[in-house]
Image (spheres, helix red, strand yellow):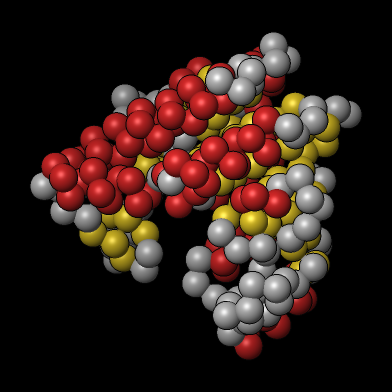
Amino acid sequence: MESLTLLKVGGKIVEEPDSLVRFLDDFAKIDGQKVLVHGGGRSATKMAERLGVETQMVNGRRITSAEMLQVVTMVYGGLVNKNVVVQLQSRGVDALGLTGADMNYMLADKRKNAEIDYGFVGDVKKVDGDKLKSLICQNIVPVLAPLTHDGQGNLLNTNADTIAGEAAKALAKLYDVTLVFCFEKKGVLRDENDDDSVIPTINKQDFDRYVESGVIQGGMIPKLQNAFNALEAGVKQVIITKADEINKNSGTTIIL
């Protein structure tokens, strides 16, 4: 099968002009077919503050009220997404920004939680990889915003790591997919205060051990759980690395 690289880049990188320029320069140089998924949480928080919409977080997860849904739609589907697309076009990369509602490529159910009402937050239930392939075959790079829909006329806020993992799983039926999570660190670190303490490979047994000892904690736990789920669903390779080292064969490789 043809190879495809799916990169997920954190909001912190796409929201800062200098880091975005460096990242997209490197992204444009990646050979072969590719897909980009982006976050944008900090921009959404800033915009909400400007508009007088309260930001509520529970365990690091955003509560998406009707008002906050309008904000994240503007920011994720508009400001951040279109800024990435226009920058890619300037580098000769033909790109198209999508939410899950566009082409109906990603459907989700509104999250039901007995203890916490997360509001308009979606848990992915179906991804149409063929729809994404129809763009990729035309040498169009899909740029996926962290928004899905329920098929009933409602947009839903969905974690960008989840978007990346679910899109990678769907595309793994059609391509040899490498899933790359890009963020500010060089990879998964043994010591969070030492940027050079990168763990080169992590398997499931390592993961359990590192979580128990506190080496892996916080937001890195669901990121790695997404990685293992993707590998089990047929994704060929998952890498966690620094955004400006995506072409340097570095970072942490996740294996089963």
When the figure is inspected, residue 143 is found, relative to residue 223, above or below; the finding is above
Which residue is situated farthest in the front direction here?
18
Q: Nearer the viewer, residue 58 or 123?
A: 58
Relative to 115, 245 lies left or right = right
Give the mark count: 0
Which residue in the rendered view is the most extreme toward the left?
Answer: 52
Q: Residue at x 70, y 51 (%)?
A: 245
Q: Nearer the viewer, residue 114 or 255?
A: 255
The image quarter in which residue 118 lies: bottom left
Outermost residue to the bottom: 213
Q: Residue at x 33, y 46 (%)?
A: 43
Q: Quadrant of the N terminus?
A: top right
| Quadrant placement of the C terminus | bottom right
The image shows residue 35 at horizontal and vertical percentages of: 64, 32
Q: Position of residue 82 (x, y in %)?
A: 43, 26
Task: Identify the image quadrant of residue 158.
Answer: top left
**Residue 45 can be seen, yes or no:** yes
Q: Residue 231: in sight, yes or no?
A: no
Residue at 38% from the left image edge and 64% from the top image edge: 60
Q: Position of residue 220 (x, y in %)?
A: 57, 66
How far across and down, in percent of the image, does residue 49 sit?
A: 17, 50
- Left/right placement of residue 46 relative to residue 224 reads left
Q: In the image as oriented, which residue stretches furthest toward the right?
A: 1
- Residue at figure coordinates x 54%, y 29% from the top left: 143
